[in-house]
Image (cartoon, grey):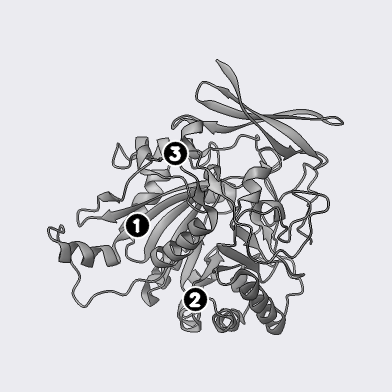
Amino acid sequence: MIKLIDVVESVCPVCLRRVAANLIGEGETVSMVKECEEHGPFSTVIWRGPPAFESWLRPKIGYQGGRRDTSTDKGCPYDCGLCPEHAQRTCTALVEVTGRCNLQCPVCFAGSGNTAGSDEDIGQISDRFAAIFASTGGCNLQISGGEPTMREDLPDIINAAGKAGFTFIQLNTNGLRLAADLNLAEKYRDAGLSSVFLQFDGISDQPYRVLRGRPLWSEKQRALENLARVGLGVVLVATVARDVNEDMLWDIVRFGIEQQPTVRGVHFQPLSFFGRYPTGFTIDHVTLPEIMTDLQKQSAGILQAADFNPPGCEHALCSFSAKYLVNADGKPMRLGQGNSCNCQPTLAEEGARQSIDATARQWGPVTLPSAAVNHQPDDLDDFLARARTHTFSISAMAFQDVWNLNLERLRGCCIHVAPSGGGLVPFCAYNLTAMDGCSLYRRG
């Protein structure tokens, strides 16, 4: 049976003009169907399979506090900065410190390359850190690019972030320089780095050839070895693309578990069609429920789709997560309750604050005890000792592109890019590109 679930606001994939969009349910599949007066109809699947779409939704009481650096003039998504219509505070601020990169990935949301470009100097970046901290009142910080390790002064940048007040500082990297230089990870750690968000698309060369343009599996392993040597926490970040690596999700999780306590979790990011991607790719989004179901199937039930919860911070349709204790036999045991909800409205700001703290605790470095606990925890002391070193998160974030953009979701975004010109822009708005590559916010 086909039914209309909701009417939301989106944009035309061609001209980025704001248009109405119908969320249409047919069985376990939900599609976004929209039409531009000039460019015609468009449709894309946004939800495929269980749990039921409506059961996943979580009402929130929007956050209207904090600084709003731009006025509402043209309306969402054209007034980002943040504007008064935005309904969530910043959980993570992302700062791009270079546009240079040592890869030319076929898939890149930033469209980065290996061409030379001018980078901001350390003074300008320090000022930007101070402005972000003042604007947000404190949040987690991710240093990104391009490839930030291309900057020889990256330790100084990390140190400047700590001086600005940030206590959880994460590096978003492909790991190539960390693999090549034995001393680099130690320099970053000593400068104050908390965590590494490591591009990690699979445990063989095949997905890297497709998504990154060349085999990288051996280099990913060397990067992990060097990070483990200095005790930095690592999150494996997999771009999930249809017919490329969706069949190896459990393999990635299992590998991550084997790398504990260095690897603190796995974070899946379904491919979004913005920035750079091969023209031959079909616009077919891997959806959150497909990832949950595939994890259950591929793990032969060790993981359950019901383990995963909607987020407390961003909009419910943006992500899922679960936390596990990995027993001595390598089997993950779910911590807390799985997907259940009384569906009473919750405060968006409270969810953001909880997420800020939980992310820093889970993804940061681990302090190893003097004597590791190597047996199945059978009392509280054993449980707590192992929980300090062997908790593991599995999460996913479905970024929006021009095909599936829902402005209600955008206004609930908590991951904000801090451009060099000032302000804070929701991640999906900042990276949004029309079919011809034209961007609303990203420049250069």
Q: Position of residue 386 (x, y in %)?
A: 23, 64
Tally of marks: 3
| Horizontal arrangement in the rendering, residue 332 relative to residue 196 (left or right) | left
Which secondary structure lies at badge 2? loop
In the image shown, does 394 or 209 lie closer to the viewer?
A: 394
Find out whether the residues at labels 2 and 3 contact each other: C-beta distance under 8 Å: no
Which secondary structure lies at badge 1? strand
Q: Amino acid at mark 3?
A: Asp
User: The C terminus lies in which quarter of the figure?
Assistant: bottom right
Work out whether mark 3 precedes mark 1 in sequence or the reverse, and give the earlier one. Answer: 3
Q: Amino acid at mark 2?
A: Thr
Mark in the foreground, 3 or 1: 1
In the image shown, does 424 or 420 lie closer to the viewer?
A: 424
Q: Is there any visible trace of residue 202 in the rendered image?
A: no
In the image shown, does 183 or 239 lie closer to the viewer?
A: 239
Instruction: Name the residue: 42% across, 39% down.
Output: 292
- The residue pinned by badge 2 equals 167
Work out whether mark 1 precedes mark 2 in sequence or the reverse, and give the earlier one. Answer: 2
- The residue pinned by badge 3 equals 247
Instruction: Name the residue: 62% across, 82% down.
Output: 153
Which secondary structure lies at badge 3? loop
- The residue pinned by badge 1 equals 392
**Neighbour class for label 2 at 10 Å: few (<14), some, many (≥20)?**
some
